[in-house]
Amino acid sequence: MRRKIVAGNWKMNGSKDLAKELVGCVRSEAEALDNGVEVVIIPPAIYVGDVVEQAGGKLAVGVQNVGQWSSGAYTGEVSADMAKDQGCEYALVGHSERRQLFGESDELVAAKVERLLASGLTAIVCVGETLDEREAGRAEAVVASQVKAALTKVAAEQWGQVVIAYEPVWAIGTGKTATAEDAQAMHAAIRVTLAEAGAPAESISLLYGGSVKADNAAALFAEPDIDGGLIGGASLKSEDFVSICRAMP
Ligand code: PEP
């Protein structure tokens, strides 16, 4: 049985007030959910403590990024151990904004995955093709290569800490969403890649991300290889985010 997950990535948005109001609201709604979905809130690192407090153990919490080192003279960085110490269970790694705006390479993503797993966190590994790559017919090859590169340092007993989020870059924050059929096809291809990489592919949760909204979530989540969503913009409004959580079958 794969974990069903809806994770909200706040990106560089939010405040103490949002942590209080939104998380409080999502928490009380999530307690009433009967679809077995794990709801994860991923705020900026500085608000993790506020969100953990508001979540009260009823929602999981994650960080958007960690440094690749365990500790030391890396001004401005947050470590995986610190995230765990603050009560996080999840961390994003390889988000396309980190790859594009901060130059994160496949090698760096693999190093961060290794660090996250060693700290006992679940890594939500983000992969996805650009529009140019899709139009050139290279989407599946690009995604397969990102998946394989990210997972080179995963030990056999750590696969339970790995989640993959397929996020086509052209769909993130653009209002354009992959069709449920296209997203399903990519998720099925990712499962093949995972098996080739020696992972227990059928037990790894695969999330779709890219302009998921209350009105398109149900069609995406109904697909057999889509186990949940990574939600950006729509995770900043509690009613939208809760509707997406409810859309899980
Ligand atoms: C994201 O930030 O991972 C994301 C999917 O954003 P949005 O839902 O806004 O497209």
Image (cartoon, grey):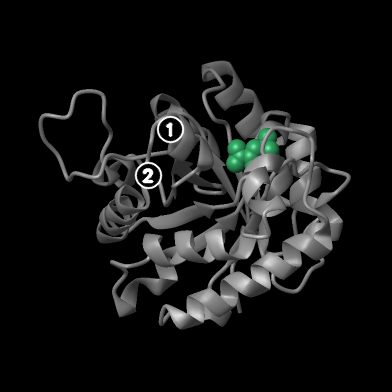
Residue 139 lies, in percent from the top left, at 63, 58
Q: Quadrant of the N terminus?
A: bottom right
Q: Residues within 10 Å of mark 1 (few under 14, many from 20)?
A: many
Left or right placement of residue 112 versus residue 208 in this view: left
Q: Residue at x 74, y 50 (%)?
A: 245
In front of the other: 75 or 238 = 75
Labels in figure, total:
2
Instruction: Give the residue furthest to the front.
Output: 136
**In terms of secondary structure, where does tag 2 sit?**
loop
Indicate the quadrant containing the C terminus: top left, top right, bottom left or bottom right.
bottom right
Report whether 235 appears left or right of 122. Answer: right
Q: Are marks 2 and 1 in contact (CB under 8 Å)?
A: yes
State the residue at coordinates (14%, 39%): 71
Q: Nearer the viewer, residue 114 or 157?
A: 114
Lower position in the chain sequence, tag 2 or tag 1: 1
| Mark 2 crowd level (few <14, some 14–19, many ≥20, 10 Å Cα) | some
- Expressed as whole percent of the image width and height from the top left, the position of residue 202 reads 57, 81
Residue 14 position within the rendered picture, expressed as x and y whole percent measured from the top left: 56, 21
- Hey, which residue is sitting farthest left in the picture? 73
Name the residue carrying label 1: 48
**In terms of secondary structure, where does tag 1 sit?**
helix
Q: Is residue 23 left or right of residue 248?
A: left
Q: Which mark is residue 238?
A: none
- The answer, for residue 118, to whether it is visible in the render is yes
| Residue beneath the point at 38% across and 35% down | 103
Q: Please report the residue visible at 68 percent of the width from the left and 41 percent of the height from the top.
A: 170
Q: Residue 47 appears at what percent x and percent y?
A: 44, 26
Q: Which mark is residue 87?
A: 2
Query: What kind of residue is marked 2?
Result: Gly
Q: Name the kind of residue labelled 1 in the image.
A: Val
